[in-house]
Each structure stands twice: as C-alpha cells, then as structure tokens.
Amino acid sequence: MPTTPSRRARAAAYLRAHGARAALEIVANFALPFAIYSLTRDDLGDVRALMAASVPPLIWSIAEFVRARKVDAIALLVLAGIALSLLAFAGGGGVKVLQLRENLVSAVVGLVFLGSAAIGRPLMYFLARAGARRRAKDPAAIEAISADPAYRRAMTVMTLAWAFGLIATSAINCTLVFLISIKLFLLVSGPISYGAIALLTAWTFWYAPRALRRVMAQAAEHQASA
C-alpha cells in the first residue's frame, strides 16, 4: 500500500510542526482552567473561581488572534469569545449565569452567520473572497468566480452549515450547564466546542474545493457554448 507510508509521513510531519502548539492549547484551554477552578473554589467560591479559570483561555485567544493577524471564521469566533468573556466578567450574577454567558459565543456567531445568509449576503462569501484575494495571482479571475451565482449559492450553503452547527453547539453546552457539575462541565464543554469547530472546518475543506470545481466547470461550459 504506497499511500499508507505517505499518510503516516504526512501525519508525523504535521505532529512535528504543530504538536507543541496543540499541547499548549490543550493546557491553556482545558488543563489550566480545570486546575485553577479546582484549587481556588474553596477560597474564592464558584463564581470567582470560574472567572479565574477563564483567564488562561482568554489570554490564549488574544495571543492567537494577534499571531494570526487575519479575519476568518475561526478569528470571528475568537473575537466574539473575547468580547463575551469580558462581558461575563463584568455582568455579575450567579455561577450558571456566568457559564451561560461564556457559552453563548457560538450562538451569537452562529446567528451572525444565519442573519448574513438570510439577507442574501452570506458571510462565508466575503471571508472566502478576502482570503482568495490575498493569495491569488490573478485578481480578475477571482472576481469572475466570485460573481458567479453558483459560487454564491455554495457560499450560502457553507454559511448555513456553520450557522446551524454553532447554534447547536451552544445549545448543547448551555443544556449541560444545568445537567452536570461545574468541574465536569469544564472537562467536556471544551472538547464539544472544539470538536464541532473541527468537524465544520473539515467539512468546509471537503466541500469548498468540490463546489469551486463545479463552478469553474459550469463557467467553462458557458464560455464554450457562447
């Protein structure tokens, strides 16, 4: 099987390139929040301990956004998470109110995606167009593809997929706030959110090239017939 060693080699290269960063992300977003909450709960109480536990993910999100220096779907999630986390710190209320505010990030971003599709200006269209302009050697070709109705329909499909996926993720996490303990929630809510984003990202990388190839094939057929 010639493909197996190749896949293993690519996986090993990816781990070498990104393994340390992934480990740091796990520490910042899962291990440290759980440890901080567990160690400070008795002294600070649930609300303040949960606020303290939110600091490492908040710092990580800010650092990642500054490092990436680009606006895409993930960056929008990060920015919304930072804003809502700061509002959660300042808003007061009980521990469940704090948990709910922090976990409304996905719902807010999902509603933004849904609203953009509803008014005929799918957010994925503008994000993909901006990214393509940065990478393209032929801006005119990008403009031609972006103006194609089939391309806009594909971007609408992607926008709706992200909208409903993020809203569903928020609904699951907000439901779990009332069903499980805070410590267990700290362990499971992150993997649920990251897992959803990973699935949406993987689907996007699968769907987008196929949609683009269909658009380009249709455009070539139209030009040939003309």
Image: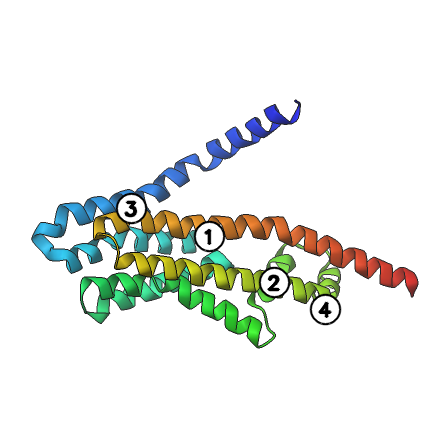
The numbered mark, 1 or 2, whose residue comes first in the sequence reads: 2
* Camera-side residue of 103 and 129: 103
Residue 197's label in the rendered image is 1
Mark 2: secondary structure: helix
Identified by mark 3, the residue type is: Leu
Q: Do the CB atoms of the residues marked 2 and 4 lie less than 8 Å apart?
A: no
Q: Residue beneath label 2, please?
A: 157
- Closer to the N terminus: mark 4 or mark 1? 4
Cα–Cα gap, marks 4 and 3: 44 Å
37 relative to 152, above or below: above
> For residue 173, what is the image quadrant?
bottom left
Q: Position of residue 85 (x, y in %)?
A: 30, 63
For residue 113, side relative to residue 2 (left or right)? left
Q: Which residue is mark 4?
A: 149
Cβ–Cβ under 8 Å for marks 1 and 3:
no
Please name the amino acid that badge 2 sits on.
Answer: Val
Q: Which mark is residue 187?
A: 3
User: Can you name the residue that lies furthest to the front here?
Assistant: 179
